[in-house]
Amino acid sequence: MSDHVRNKMGSTAREGTATGLVGRDHECAVIDGLLDGASEGNSGALVLRGEAGTGKTSLLQCAAERADELTVLKVTGVQGESDLDFAGLHSLVRPIVGYLAKLPEPQRDAVEGALGLAPSRGADRFLVSAGVLSLLAAAAEECSLLCLVDDAQWLDVPSAASLVFTARRLGAEGLVIMFAAREGERRRFDAPGLGELVLGGLDHESPSVLLSRSAPDATPWVRKRSWPRRRVTRWRCSSFRPRCRTGSLPAASCCPTHCR
Ligand SMILES: Nc1ncnc2c1ncn2[C@@H]1O[C@H](COP(=O)(O)OP(=O)(O)OP(=O)(O)O)[C@@H](O)[C@H]1O
Ligand SMILES: [Mg+2]
C-alpha cells in the first residue's frame, strides 16, 4: 500500500485534535463512533448532506485527522468528470490496486476493465461493484480503511453506484465509507439505505464562538453589526463575515478558522 495514503497522525493524535468546528459535536461523535468501530474490525457508512458551506468537507477532514490508526483513501467528485464512467472510482482505489490480485477472477477482470488496467469486456456493473467491495475488504485486512468521498453529487454514476453498493454490504471488514453531498445541486447523490446526517444551521451560541475566534479584537460596535439578523437556523458558517469597514479588522480575522 502506498505510503502517501497512510495517515501520519500518531496514536495519540485523536485526543489532541481540536476539530476547529463549532456546533458540530453530535456529528463529530457519530464520526468517532464509526472510527472506533473500524479500529475494532467493524464497518460503517455515513452520508453527510447539506447546502454549500455547511461544513461537509470540514467534517471529512476532521475524520481524516482523527483516523489515527486507519489508512485513508480520498476522492472528490469533479463536475467535469461526471460523465466519465468510473473516473471517481479510479481516483479512490488507485493506491490499493495491488490488492486486485486477491480478488476472484471475474471480479478482478471486471474492476481492471473498469479502471482501464485491462481490456474492458463491457462493464458488468454488478461484477465491478462486487469487485470494489472485495478490493476494499482485501486492503482493510492489512489495515483498517477510511474512504472519504467528497462532493459525491458530482461522481460519475457507475462510481457512485458501486460505492453505494459496497457501503450497503459492509460487515466486519474494518472499513468506513463517508460521503459528503451538497444539497440543492442539479445532480443529487442518492444513497438509499445508508445512514445520513443532514447539516443544518448552527445553534444560538455558535455565532459568538466563531466571532470571538475569528475576530478576537472586534470592538462592541463590530460585534453588534456582525450578529446575523436572519434566523440562526438559516445561517451558514461560510457566510459568516464580521461586517467591518476597511482597516477596522485584519483581513485574516474575517474568516472562520478551518478545521485543523
Ligand atoms: N461548524 C463550523 N465551525 C467553524 N467553521 C466552519 C464550520 N462549518 C464550516 N466552517 C467553515 O466554513 C467554510 C466552508 O466549509 P466547508 O468547505 O466544509 O463547507 P461544505 O459544506 O463542504 O461546502 P461545499 O458544499 O461548498 O463543498 C470553511 O472555511 C469551514 O472551515
Ligand atoms: Mg465541500
Image (tube, rainbow, N blue to C red):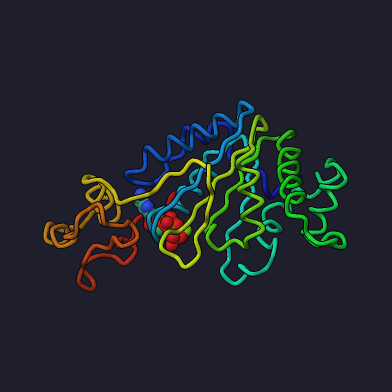
Tell me where residue 159 appears, x and y as whole percent: 66, 57
Residue 151 lies left or right of residue 22; in this view the side is right
Q: Quadrant of residue 94?
A: bottom right
Q: Is residue 58 visible?
A: yes
Q: Please count the marks in the image.
A: 0
Residue 190 lies left or right of residue 233; in this view the side is right
Tell me where residue 76 appears, x and y as whole percent: 58, 59
Q: 76 or 207: nearer the eye?
A: 76
As drawn, the residue found furthest toward the top would be: 40
Q: Could you tell me which residue is drawn at 84 percent across and 62 percent down?
A: 120
Q: 15 or 148: nearer the eye?
A: 148
Q: Quadrant of residue 205?
A: top left
Q: Could you tell me which residue is drawn at 86 percent across and 44 percent down?
A: 101
Decide: is 184 above or below 40: below
Q: Could you tell me which residue is drawn at 49 percent across and 60 percent down?
A: 188
Residue 89 lies left or right of residue 219; in this view the side is right
Name the image quarter holding the N terminus.
top right
Q: Could you tell me which residue is drawn at 22 percent across and 53 percent down?
A: 232
Q: Is residue 260 visible?
A: no
Decide: is 133 above or below 230: above
Residue 75 lies left or right of residue 20; in this view the side is right
Tell me where residue 187 appears, x and y as whole percent: 50, 65
